[in-house]
Image (cartoon, rainbow, N blue to C red):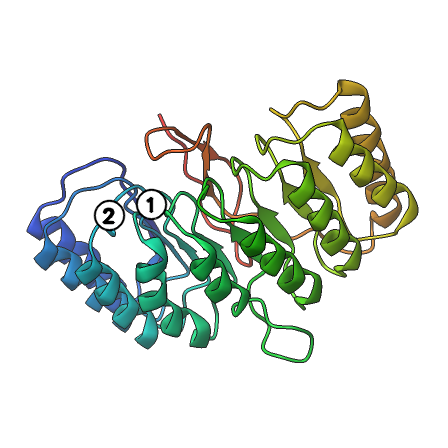
Amino acid sequence: MLPGSIHMSGEALSGAEVKGVCEGLVGGTVRLLSLRGCHLSDRDFARLCQGVSQSSSLVQLNLNLGIVSSGARVQQLAQGLHANRSLQSLFLHGNPLTDTGLALLNPALAVHPSLVSLDLGDCMLGDEGISLICGLLPPDGAKPGLRELTLSANPSVTCSGWARLAIAVAHSSQIRTLNLDYNPLGDHIASMLAVCVASSRTLEVLDLEGTGLTNQSAQILLDMVQNYPTPLKTIILSENNISVDLQQKIADLLSEGEEEDEGEGQEMDRPVREKATKPGPAFHRVLLASSLGDSLLAETEM
């Protein structure tokens, strides 16, 4: 049997169903596992993490929307990730991790040999959590690190935390997509991000939707795109107080650069991720996309 995918959303899983999932993980028949918003007992969650630890086929794991709901579950997930070697994409959007929970996960994330995409949106993170994440974006010459990072809707992060992240992104050897939508960044932090984008040799997508920007920061981004060649292909600026004219000018310039690069290499596919329509766990929509690396099935929310 070829490795396949399991998609469940908002369901209460029985012990028998979890047992079947675990058998697929251990037997190498599950490549993508999405249990977003599902309910399962603490015992079954521990069994699931044990299955993740023994899987050699699992590439993408989606535990979005409240599944990792306690410190005990965070610790169990960390143990499962520490033993796993195959996982490439981990989605934990909408779980109340806080900085404390991320500190428990971080040792396993930092040593994982294959992880390239991480979604920690709406996880109640602060500056301490951002400091840990910066360690997953090593500078040139270190291990590859993350290619896609989602930190949507973490409003407790301060200017200092975002500045630290901007420095890490500027020196990251691999980061290609950075999703910061629905954080109260404002023009000051956006200006810092423009500097990091101009310094990065790999960043292709920057999502700043609903981050409190005005024409002031948009003009800085426009100047950056006009005057400093970067790999950037997309800046998402919707739901900000930015004129349509400025947004169009930025989009046109990025489109010109993308046309020039056409044929030089295939753009890396983006994985499925939750995208908050406003801060808070109750408001989410799914961004349809394909996975990093090998092609995986996309998830849609009915």
- Mark-to-mark CA distance, 1 and 2: 6 Å
Q: Residue at x 72, y 55 (%)?
A: 196
Q: Which residue is mark 1?
A: 64
| Secondary-structure class at tag 1 | loop
Give me the disc on residue 235.
none
Left or right of residue 80: residue 225: right
* Number of numbered discs visible in the structure rendering: 2
The residue lying furthest to the top in this view is 244
Percent from the top left, x then y, of residue 70?
A: 20, 54
Tell me which corner region of the image, top left, top right, bottom left or bottom right, holds residue 185.
Answer: top right
State yes or no: discs 1 and 2 in contact (Cβ < 8 Å): yes
280 vs 91, nearest the viewer: 280
Looking at the rendered structure, the secondary structure element under dot 2 is loop
Q: Position of residue 36 (x, y in %)?
A: 30, 42
Indicate left or right for 292 with 82 as reference.
right
Q: Residues within 10 Å of mark 2 (few under 14, many from 20)?
A: many
**Between 38 and 140, which is closer to the camera in this rendering?**
140
**Residue at x-position 75% and y-position 44%:** 233
Question: Which residue is at a point 23% across and 66% down the rendered structure image?
Answer: 75
In the rendered image, is residue 1 in sight?
A: no
Disc 2: which residue:
67
- 250 to 132, vertically: above or below: above
Q: Position of residue 66 (x, y in %)?
A: 26, 44
Residue 112 against residue 193 in the figure, above or below:
below
Q: Quadrant of the C terminus?
A: top left
